[in-house]
Image (cartoon, grey):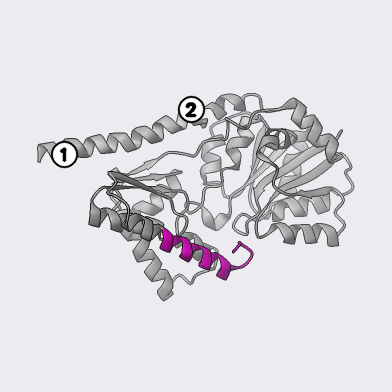
Amino acid sequence: MGKDAKWKRAVDFTSLGIKCALRLIFSPRYDAIIALPSPPLVAALGALVCRINGGKLFYWVMDLNPDEAVAAGWLKKTGRLTHLLEEVSRYSLRHSHRIITLDRFMRDLILKKGIDPETVKVIPPWAHDDAVQFDPEGRDKFRERHGLNGKFVVMYSGNHSPCHPLTNLIDAARCMQADDSVRFCLVGGGSEHRKIQAIVGSENLTNVICLPYQPLNELSGSLSAADLHVVVMGEAFVGTIHPCKIYNALTVQAPVLCVGPAECHLADILGGSNDPHWGHVGHGEVDKTIAQIRRIQKLNSRGVAFSELAKRFSAGAVMPELIEAIESREDDSAADSQND
């Protein structure tokens, strides 16, 4: 039914959950079920079916609820519904044979729920490196199409979510309107996209361009068009969500500006690098955001060294680790059964 209203999302999740339940109940027994966190409660269905029919649940946790919903203010921390959802979440986690999580902060939150540390393994997501690479020709076409030739392009590309506010960027754009050398390019969708478009239009921010999601076959070109990619981590959402924009940004060798708390997965990825092509600012630090933009603009170069860092997060590097985590857990279980 769409994502423009919470009740529509609830209806979509509920109907899909029912379909999943019926499919699992009337399907043959599986040795392993891999569950994702969306739609909500689907992992609990997987856990229940494994308890009834046998088999093992592998829970690939990409976001953590109801923790995220509480942090966003969508649920009350002490509400009855929150308590119910928390119990369902813990049921899924307790009955998972292996839990794959995306960063150490998410792992820490899961462990605080009383989950056995031996079952939880951190494996980051991977870049779309099969479809995304630095594309000089696509870069030129994108910049030509959108009037960006000769400009320093600061880009945010992805979901415009209230969890990861773009306030720093909009405020920086307001302050830098007189600087004709810089353009802010906001690409994507999500619940905040229309709001940002409305702000840009009502305030006549001529240095900001808002664009929809780009086709996959043009993604390399649009991402490569940026001279600086901005990735945002909401202050309250560390450990509950894992924004993945940074991986594609590294793949196209773009300088990166991280907006968010000092302790988060973005800082973990880039914090050990002395490369000048990345920077970090906190939410609300508009002056520092502008200073970082100007500093990186003066470098006038791409983060070529990021290509080596990107290889650590390529599908070829990460996917085998995920497969090994599942298969090794299966092997350990088989060995335990033989010993019994």
Q: Is residue 102 left or right of residue 299?
A: left
Residue in view at x 37 percent, y 60 percent: 21
Q: Which residue is mark 2?
A: 316
Q: Position of residue 79 (x, y in %)?
A: 43, 74
Q: Position of residue 189 (x, y in %)?
A: 68, 53
Q: Secondary structure at mark 1?
A: helix
Residue 15 sits inside the magenta stretch: yes
Task: Name the spot of residue 243 as percent of width and height, x first.
Answer: 56, 47
| Crowd tier of the residue under label 1, counting other residues whose Cα lies within 10 Å: few below 14, some 14–19, many 20 or above | few
Magenta span: predominant SS is helix
Q: Is residue 301 visible?
A: no
Q: Nearer the viewer, residue 295 or 337?
A: 337
Q: Position of residue 230 (x, y in %)?
A: 67, 43
Q: Amino acid at mark 1?
A: Asp
Figure check: 136 above or below 217: above
Q: Going by the image, does 311 lie left or right of 332?
A: right
Residue 60 visible? The answer is yes
User: Residue at (34%, 52%) from the top-left corner?
Assistant: 111
Quarter of the image that includes the C terminus: top left
Instruction: From the image, tell me which residue sits under label 1.
Output: 336
Tag 2: amino acid? Gly
Query: Callout 2: helix, strand or loop?
Result: helix
Residue lying at 54% horizontally and 58% vertically, measured from the top left: 236
Please provide the residue range marked out in magenta.
Answer: 1-19
* Foreground residue among 329 and 163: 329
